[in-house]
Amino acid sequence: MDCRIRGGRLDKVKTSLPFKLRQDSIVIIKGLPVLQCQNCNEYLMEDLVMEKVDNILDNTGKTAELEILDYAV
Ligand SMILES: [Zn+2]
């Protein structure tokens, strides 16, 4: 799989990314498997990963302003 932006090679890496739910609520997901471009350092998420992130976000962030979660739970 190649980068959609500049055609660079993508490496599978694990990282932590913040997701903003509302104006004052942020969820950080740790151990997220993403594809990182070697050229532009852009991250891409595979569809399956996106879906799981959506599920995680649906079930969290209701009360806390900042939550840190593990992807692999
Ligand atoms: Zn790229």
Image (spheres, rainbow, N blue to C red):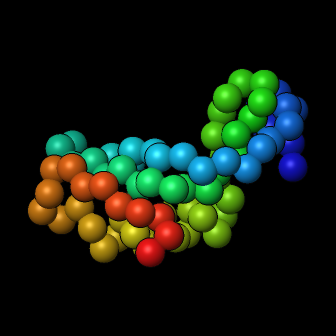
Q: Residue at x 21, y 43 (%)?
A: 23
| Image position, residue 29 (x, y; %) | 41, 55
Q: Quadrant of residue 5?
A: top right
Q: Residue at x 40, y 69 (%)?
A: 56
Q: Residue at x 27, y 67 (%)?
A: 60
Can residue 7 be seen here?
Answer: yes
In this rendering, the answer to whether 43 lies above or below 58 is above
Q: Nearer the viewer, residue 34 or 73?
A: 73
| Image position, residue 11 (x, y; %) | 77, 44
In this rendering, the answer to whether 6 lies above or below 58 is above
Can residue 22 be seen here?
Answer: no
In the displayed structure, does residue 2 sit left or right of residue 23? right
In the displayed structure, does residue 62 sit left or right of residue 44? left
Q: Residue at x 86, y 42 (%)?
A: 2
Q: Quadrant of residue 69?
A: bottom left
In the displayed structure, does residue 5 sit left or right of residue 23? right
Q: Residue furthest left?
A: 63
| Image position, residue 59 (x, y; %) | 30, 73
Work out which quarter of the rendered image holds the C terminus and state it: bottom left
